[in-house]
């Protein structure tokens, strides 16, 4: 029997993860008709998408506040679609604030109704870093929470919410580290997967690369660009006069990292990919003044760099505005270059330990996800 399911994702990383979830559901449960909102990977996996995923490309509290009226209208349209198609399960993937908003309003609309679809969210809120108040919201709103990190299930009340560590999708890629002498590039540069992140981060990164080239001759750089940002990034690199130094390629991040001695990256999943490739680097993130205030008040950890959090280490220097500027980033990058062999060796040693921590079972992420879904759905 064909099952009707709804799925929602709002960012490039969520699109990839949701597509993997869709494939796993198909293997676990057979024929499925998918509706909802997502990107190219989800559409390739069989999604009929009624909305453009880029509508959720928002950074920080100030951008979110400005977008609230538009997001409320989007939520209404998606809930109307759910009520029209009456899926057995509603999946939401990452985009946590918006996912909770849709799920809560759906619960309210269905109050007293006999039909109650199961609500499953994938990617836990980072209550271990900030926003512990979100714990109760998730426990009260969703039926199932699928976690990517091994320490997350114990943070939730599992008498209210079914919580499962499913492993991390990066473990689907074979562990591959490259000796420093075999690397083709000095740096991989990763400004982020969202347009606004590229706008904030790439000009600064290019400025620093110019300064580094003055000190370290023949500097070579690779920049893995997602397809929808390739043109924009290429234009910025060309305008900076760095076409000969920076190769902008539409290739997976891990492919670029496996050819590089070091990385300059925006905070996020890119740092996990770098650590699993055994590549040292510097991590940055730009925040508006309002977002900085919000972070100062609520963020609880010394660093947001994922591999350092998981391994309880401080391998990746982190620069956050207002301390993020060209001089500060140049200093950290130059320090990295001057101590590159040791930093590279340290990260190569950490890669295997990190890989093991991110596995939920003996198989790959996709295999463990199928097994998990068979037992839960």
Image (cartoon, rainbow, N blue to C red):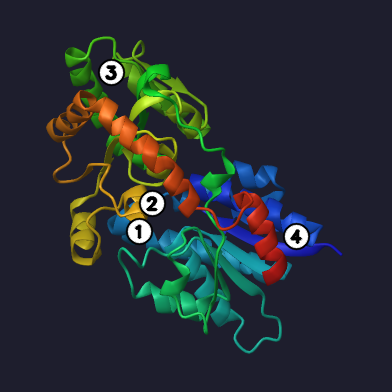
Question: From the viewer's perspective, is the residue at label 1 or at label 4 nearer?
Answer: 4
Q: Quadrant of the N terminus?
A: bottom right
| 168 and 195: which is toward the camera | 168
Mark 1 — residue?
64
Residue bearing mark 3: 240
Q: In this view, does 109 lie above or below 229?
A: below
Q: In which quarter of the image is residue 261?
A: top left
Across and down, in percent, residue 59 comes to: 34, 51
Of residues 78 and 220, the one nearer the viewer is 220
Between disc 2 and disc 3, whose residue precedes? 2
In the figure, is residue 70 to the left or right of 220? Answer: right
Q: Is mark 2 on a helix, strand or loop?
A: loop
The C terminus is located in which quarter? bottom right
Asked if the residue at tag 4 contacts the one at tag 3, i.e. Cβ–Cβ closer than 8 Å, the answer is: no
* Residue 6 falls left or right of residue 167: right
Residue 324 picture location, percent across and down: 17, 40
Q: Residue 58 carries which label?
A: 2
Is 244 placed above or below 101 here? above
Marks 4 and 2, the one that precedes in the sequence: 4
C-beta proximity under 8 Å, tags 1 and 3:
no
Work out how far the residue at label 2 is from the one at label 1, CA to CA, in angstroms.
Answer: 6 Å
Q: Nearer the viewer, mark 3 or mark 4?
A: 4
SS for callout 4: helix
Mark 3 or mark 4, earlier in chain: 4
Which residue is pictured at 25% across the width and 44% down the height? 286
Q: Give the spatial CA distance, label 3 vs label 4.
A: 49 Å
Say few, some or many: other residues with alpha carbon within 10 Å of mark 1 (under 14 / 14 to 19 / 20 or more): some
Near-viewer residue (153 or 33): 153
Toward the bottom, the furthest residue is 112
In this orientation, does residue 307 appear? yes
User: Disc 4 marks which residue?
Assistant: 28
Q: Are marks 2 and 1 in contact (CB under 8 Å)?
A: yes
């Amino acid at each position: 029997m064909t099952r009707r399911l709804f799925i929602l994702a709002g960012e490039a990383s969520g699109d990839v993860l949701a597509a993997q979830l869709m494939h796993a559901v198909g293997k676990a449960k057979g024929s499925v008709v998918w509706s909802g909102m997502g990107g190219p990977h989800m559409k390739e996996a069989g999604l009929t998408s009624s909305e453009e995923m880029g509508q959720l490309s928002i950074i920080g509290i100030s951008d979110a506040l400005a977008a609230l009226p538009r997001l409320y209208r989007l939520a209404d349209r998606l809930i109307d679609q759910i009520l029209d198609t009456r899926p057995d399960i509603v999946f939401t993937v990452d985009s946590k604030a918006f996912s909770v908003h849709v799920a809560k309003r759906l619960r309210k609309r269905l109050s007293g109704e006999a039909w109650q679809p199961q609500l499953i969210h994938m990617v836990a809120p980072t209550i271990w870093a900030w926003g512990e108040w979100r714990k109760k919201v998730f426990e009260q709103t969703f039926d199932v929470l699928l976690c990517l990190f091994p320490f997350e299930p114990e943070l939730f009340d599992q008498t209210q919410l079914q919580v499962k560590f499913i492993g991390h999708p990066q473990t689907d890629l074979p562990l591959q580290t490259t000796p420093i002498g075999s690397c083709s590039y000095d740096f991989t540069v990763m400004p982020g997967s969202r347009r606004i992140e590229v706008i904030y981060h790439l000009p600064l990164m290019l400025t620093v690369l110019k300064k580094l080239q003055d000190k370290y001759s023949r500097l070579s750089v690779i920049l893995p660009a997602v397809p929808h940002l390739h043109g924009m990034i290429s234009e910025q690199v060309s305008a900076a006069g760095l076409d000969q130094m920076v190769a902008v390629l539409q290739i997976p991040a891990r492919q670029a990292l496996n050819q590089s001695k070091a990385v300059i990256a925006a905070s996020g999943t890119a740092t996990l990919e770098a650590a699993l490739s055994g590549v040292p680097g510097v991590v940055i993130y730009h925040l508006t003044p309002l977002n900085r205030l919000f972070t100062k008040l609520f963020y609880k950890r010394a660093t947001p760099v994922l591999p350092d959090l998981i391994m309880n280490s401080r391998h990746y220097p982190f620069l956050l505005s207002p301390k993020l500027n060209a001089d500060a980033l140049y200093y950290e990058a130059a320090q990295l270059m001057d101590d590159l062999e040791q930093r590279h060796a340290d990260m190569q040693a950490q890669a295997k330990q990190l890989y093991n921590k991110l596995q939920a079972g003996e198989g790959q992420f996709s295999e463990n996800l199928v097994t998990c879904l068979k037992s839960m759905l």
